[in-house]
Amino acid sequence: MKYCPQCGNKTEPIIPEGDNRVRDVCDSCDLIHYQNPRIIAGCIPAWDDKVLLCKRAIHPRKGFWTLPAGFMELGETTEQAALRETLEEAEAVVQAQGLYAVFNLPHINQVYMMYRSALLKPEFSSGIESLEVRLFAEHEIPWDGLAFETMRLSLEYYFQDMKAGAFKFRSADIEKPLFR
Amino acid sequence: MKYCPQCGNKTEPIIPEGDNRVRDVCDSCDLIHYQNPRIIAGCIPAWDDKVLLCKRAIHPRKGFWTLPAGFMELGETTEQAALRETLEEAEAVVQAQGLYAVFNLPHINQVYMMYRSALLKPEFSSGIESLEVRLFAEHEIPWDGLAFETMRLSLEYYFQDMKAGAFKFRSADIEKPLFR
């Protein structure tokens, strides 16, 4: 940040009084502009023993497969964000079945929140951000063609738990960009 | 937002091409400025059958009791944020014991992530944001003097689960400011 979003004058990176971190502070109106990590909410949409993946039509990782997920918007809950992304990217209506996994990616200031979910009907199609959408059984998953480490982990945990007969809450920290 | 943080020229609230929401877009450099919900990470610090609460020294809800919690910062994980807030507000060192509760507050664009945690020693004191810090057994909790609905729910769930002998992951949406 170089300019104050409120008054348009220059900001300076300084440590405000009583704080212990550098913030962008307006030289003119004294507003302190905080920056915070963002949430990416998504679904693991299930139909029988299969899950729904989308082939990305957009950068980054265009042409690679992902579970439906995207940035949480103002005014919605994490579950609503996950369902909205599934509708937008896979044109699929799902019922949420609880938060399944949280992934922290501190190097890019992202927190993933992935929900288990059930397709109400095996009906889906490519949303504007997807080239292709289809159901995959475990042995069909394109492990080398997945878009993100968070998706590999989500799917690994999911199929492990499915075979064990019980889904348990999962979390992991991804400290470095291992995947690319 | 009125001015572009990148170039200082005026922004306009418009729906960018391919999007379906109003964003602040710079008239001059065309940057789209997204705004997203923020995460508040906190702990339920336990010692025997007691939990550690802090009396707030700062607004909002100055003088009311809260579990240690605060805005997640760039470059940290949700668990690190929860432990840092506990150190800052209660000067207490705790060991995290897993994510316990997620609360969505879409009307104020906040997502709370509360961790169960164990005090390593019964040692704590008032950080700069606290007037007083002390351990409370369930019957001592100042239910009418709690700062936030998220703290009431965290404590209710926690003591319910403690009595039941097993802690289970909790989540709730708080759609309206019921508490104040």
Image: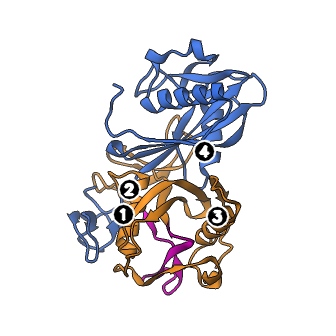
Chain colours: A orange, B blue
Amino acid residing under circle 2: Gln
Please report contact status of discs 4 and 2: CB closer than 8 Å, yes or no. Answer: no
* Crowd rating for badge 4 (residues with CA inside 10 Å; few <14, some 14–19, many 20+): many
Where is residue B106 shown, x and y percent of the image?
35, 46
The quadrant the N terminus of chain B occupies is bottom left
Mark 4 to mark 2 CA distance (whole Å)? 24 Å
- For disc 3, the marked residue is A162
Placement of B120 over or under B17, stated as above or below: above
Mark 1 or mark 3: name the one nearer the start of the chain. Answer: 1
Farthest residue in the right direction?
A: B121
Mark 1 to mark 2 CA distance (whole Å)? 6 Å
- For disc 4, the marked residue is B81
What secondary structure is marked by label 4? helix
What secondary structure is marked by label 3? helix
Where is residue B116 shown, x and y percent of the image?
65, 36
Magenta stretch bounds: A45-73
Q: Residue at x 60, y 84 (%)?
A: A145
Nearest to viewer (mark 3 / mark 2):
3
* Disc 1 chain ID: A
Mark 4 to mark 1 CA distance (whole Å)? 28 Å
* Disc 2 chain ID: A
* Disc 4 chain ID: B
Q: Does B118 sit left or right of B161 as displayed?
A: right
Please report contact status of discs 1 and 2: CB closer than 8 Å, yes or no. Answer: yes
- For disc 1, the marked residue is A84
Q: Which mark is residue B23?
A: none
Is label 4 on the same chain as label 2?
A: no
The quadrant the C terminus of chain B occupies is top left
- For disc 2, the marked residue is A80
